[in-house]
Amino acid sequence: MVTVTDKAKKGKTLTYSIVGSTEADPSANRLSNESPVGKALLGHKRNDVVDVPLPNGKKLHYKITKIDVGL
């Protein structure tokens, strides 16, 4: 699970699980590793600021605040 702070929305905190495409359920905050947000978050660490390019040309700006690795 990855917890991020949305820098554009006054520090709103969001928590996502990054999963494979067959397990994805955006309504349950389970994002595919192939989605724009999933791709952008992979490979980063706590305190990184990540820009997420969206298909509509806009960008999300997230700061990673916590990473929980489940086994």
Image (cartoon, rainbow, N blue to C red):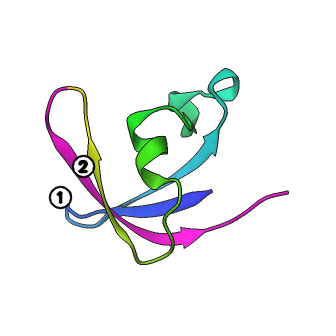
Q: Is residue 12 left or right of residue 42?
A: left
- Please state which amino acid type lies under the numbered disc 2: Leu
For this orientation, the residue located farthest to the left is 57
Which structural element holds mark 2? strand
Q: Is residue 47 left or right of residue 30?
A: left
Q: Nearer the viewer, residue 63 or 9?
A: 63
Extent of the magenta region:
56-71
Circle on res. 8: 1
- Please state which amino acid type lies under the numbered disc 1: Ala
- Residue contact between numbered discs 2 and 1, judged by CB atoms under 8 Å: yes
- Which residue matches tag 2? 60
Mark sitting earlier along the chain (2/1): 1
Residue 50, picture quadrant: bottom left
In percent of width and height, residue 41 lies at 46, 54
Q: Residue drawn at (41%, 78%), measured in percent from left and top?
A: 47
Residue 13, picture quadrant: bottom left
